[in-house]
Structures are given as C-alpha cells and as structure tokens.
Image (cartoon, grey):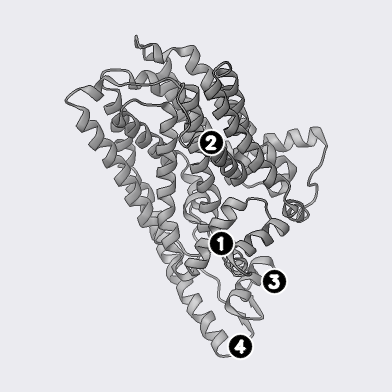
Amino acid sequence: MDPLASRISESRLAPLAAWVAVAAVAVTLWVMVRHGLAIPASADDFCNRNNAFAGTALEATLASYEGWTGRLVTTFALYHALRLVDLPQLAVISSLLPLLLALGAWLLAGAFDARHAIDRLAIAAFLLVAAVLGLHHFTGQVVFWATGGIVYLLPLVLLAAWLATMARIADGKPARGGALGAFVLGVLAGNSIELAWSALAVVGLAVLVAVRGQPRQLRHAMAAVAGAIAGAAILAAAPGNYVRATATERSFGLDAPWLAGEYARMLGEVFAKAPGFLAGLAALVAVGLVVRTPNLATHWRQRALVAALLVVAALASLLPVLAVPPQFAPRNGFFLLVLLLAAVAAFAVPPILATRYGALLLAGAALAGSLLLPFRYAEDTQVAQLLRARWTERHHALRAAASAGRKDVVLARLPFYPRPTVHALELGDDPARWDNKCVARYYGLASVTVPAER
C-alpha cells in the first residue's frame, strides 16, 4: 500500500493524537483482560490438556498431525500453553489472548506503511476497536476461549505480519530478515490455519506481479510466497485431516450444486452474526468516497484495487471449509470479516489520514468506540464470573470424588446464560460423548455425566 503521512504528525497536535490512541487501546484491553479472567475452561480444553501430555510437547503435536490436524504451528503453541497452565488457572491464558488481537492490529497497521509512528498507532487503535466492537458475537470462541483463541489469534498475528512484509516489499523495501526471514514467516503463516490461505494466495500473486522487474523485491516476494506454499502443503498433507473428516458425513464431496448451497449458507450464518459490523464497513466506505485530498498516495483507483483484492481473499477464506461442510461453525468466518475490515480500511483510511487532523480523527473514533465496551461487556462479565464460580465448585467436587476412589460421577447441571463472549458447553447424559470422556479422563474417573435438561 502507498506510504501515508498525516499532516498532524508534524503539528503540535501530534502528541494528543498519540495519547488518544493509547487511551483507546488501554481501555479496550482493560475491558477484555478483565473479562478473560472470568472465563472458565470448556469442552475442547479438557481434551487438549489430556492430549498435550501424550509424551513431550513435540510428540503430542506430531500425534495430532497424524490423528487430527496439520496445523503444527498452533497445535504446538496450544499444547505448550496447556502444559504450562492447568485448567483451573486457564483464565490466565484467556486474559492474555486479547494482547494477541492488539498485536495483530498493530502488525496489520504496518501494511499501510505509515511514515510516522503516530499514524500507525492511530490506525492500529482504530482497527482494534472496530474489530472488538463489530465482532462481539465471535469473541467468545476466537478470543476468550483458550483453545479457540490460540487457534485463531496466533494465525491472525502471523498473517498480519506476512501482509505487512508483502506491503513493504511492494513499496520497494527489503523484507525484514531478508529472503530467509520472508520464507520462514511464510511457512509459519501458511501452516497456521487454512482460513488464511486465500489471503496468502491473492496478495502473494498481486505483489509478485507488482515487483516484476525489481530483482531484490522479486526475490523476497518469491521467498515469502514459497514459504506460504510450503507451510500450506505441510498442513494439507496431514493424515489427521482425513481422520478428522470421517467424523461427519459428506466430507470431501464433489457435488457442485450442494457445495454452492453450503457456501451460501456459511456466508449467511457469518453475516447474520455481524450486521452492525457490516453497516459500519459500509459507512466507512462512504467516508472514503467523500473525503478528497490532493495527496497522490490516496489515489482512489489504487486504493480500490487493493480493497478489491482483499475482498476476494475474504470471500475465498471459507473455501477450505467446503472440504467438510458439516463441521462448519460461524467462528470459521472470523478471517473473512477481518479481511473485509482490512479491505475497507485500505480504501478509506488513506484519505482520512491524509487530511490535516487525520490521525487525531482515527484515534478519536477509536477512543469513542472503546468507551462503549465497559457497558457492552458488563453483563457478559457477570455471567462469566458466575459460571466460573460454579465451574470451580464442580472442579473441587470431581477432585474429591477421584480422591475418594469413586469411578462414576453424576453432576448437577451448571446454570447457563448464553452470552456471545462466553464459550461454554455443558456435558451430556451419555458418558461416551466426546467431552464427557475428556472430562472423566482429566479427573481420573471412569465416567462423568450430567442429567438431561427437563
């Protein structure tokens, strides 16, 4: 993307813009960290904790590669986290995961190649608050849930770093770490999650075309793309992918009309959970069309091209899920929505930033949005705290039952008040159900059940 230089960066208001942006980030992280500290362990956390101790962390990761997923990067990180932090203290991980979201926003802001740190800080604050506010219904599963947060946010950080590297290369600068650094980053991003492949492919191809005829830039871009391909190939080749696919019917189907219908269904489910976010993106596009500046870096055709490429990448991010449509969950649309935010920002932010008070306007919008978060999270955090208290009581009861030599335990149902920022699944009345088995194994019991809801 084109270099940006807000005039405010050279004015007396520059420190104000910086402090406003810092305040927006601080308020946002305060609300999210506080909420994360109230999140109890749930569902897959028990299974993954058990799996994490199947040998060393490396051995457990390789076992997962053979039997569940080819995401070596995120699986290794997840297993390390679960080996370091036991489930009763897992809220510590949940409280730290919002920092990864903030880091992703900072790295993604680097794709704008802002010339001044104040400009980049304003962009990062705006992107962070927009994502937290707009994707409220997704945060329970992709931020605060320990397993989901690591699986989604670590790839987001790697993808954002890769995009910033490609923007740097397209701008005629060398990749940090040279060709080798670009290749390694590509491997990590490509292997982290299949939902990022579309962005790697679309942006990678665009940059390769843009830097043809520039030997050093072409070499670095080719290294970054080659790394992404290698990482994706390692993920795709995992035997575990095919083992996992057998859990549901109609996996790897080739019925084109049915797949088209499934794709439309997925899009519908994702968009249905983010109407306010989509409305905000439309409003931001309108602002980008209205604002006029003489700065050549804000030329609308180039901005529109970058935005269009990111929109294509966003819509294509769900294509890998078509290999196993029955396993789709709305959280799979997280990368789709983040890429749409990046696309709209690529179109609208440059002209805003190039105005006299552009950085201050972006930072001010971020601060205004962040001040809504304490009110939006108030009830959610109360629910999480209540659920955590009940979960802690259950934890002590199960530990006591195991110490007393009991083998089969029947538990009272937990009070559930569904909230979008709290991912919690209750156990079932079938001791053979996957999550019941994981919980029983964790506590050293033969079986754990919860009576069916009447």
Q: Nearer the viewer, mark 4 or mark 1?
A: 1
Question: Vertically, is 306 above or below 200?
Answer: above
Q: Work out which quarter of the rendered image holds the C terminus and state it.
A: bottom right
Q: Identify the residue under disc 4.
A: 406
Q: Please tell me which residue is depicted at 54% across the width and 53% down the height of the picture.
A: 148
Q: Quadrant of residue 111?
A: top left
Please tell me which residue lies in front, 91 or 209. Answer: 209
Q: CA distance from mark 2 to mark 1?
A: 26 Å
Mark found first going from the N terminus, 3 or 2: 2
Mark found first going from the N terminus, 4 or 1: 1
Crowding around mark 1 (Cα neighbors within 10 Å: few <14, some 14 to 19, many 20+) is many
**Label 4: which secondary element:** loop
What amino acid type is highlighted by mark number 2? Ala
Q: Please tell me which residue is depicted at 63% across the width and 73% down the height of the picture.
A: 451
Q: Nearer the viewer, mark 1 or mark 3?
A: 1
The reply to whether discs 2 and 1 touch (Cβ–Cβ < 8 Å) is no
Please tell me which residue lies in front, 395 or 442. Answer: 442
Q: Please tell me which residue is depicted at 59% across the width and 74% down the height of the picture.
A: 442
Q: Identify the residue under disc 1.
A: 79
What amino acid type is highlighted by mark number 3? Asp
The reply to whether discs 4 and 3 touch (Cβ–Cβ < 8 Å) is no
Mark found first going from the N terminus, 2 or 1: 1
The residue positioned farthest toward the bottom in the image shown? 404
Q: Identify the residue under disc 2.
A: 182
User: In the image, which disc is placed on residue 430?
Assistant: 3
Q: CA distance from mark 4 to mark 2?
A: 55 Å
Q: CA distance from mark 4 to mark 1?
A: 29 Å
The reply to whether discs 1 and 3 touch (Cβ–Cβ < 8 Å) is no
Mark found first going from the N terminus, 4 or 2: 2
Please say whether residue 272 is visible from this viewpoint: no
Q: Nearer the viewer, mark 3 or mark 2?
A: 2
Mark found first going from the N terminus, 4 or 3: 4
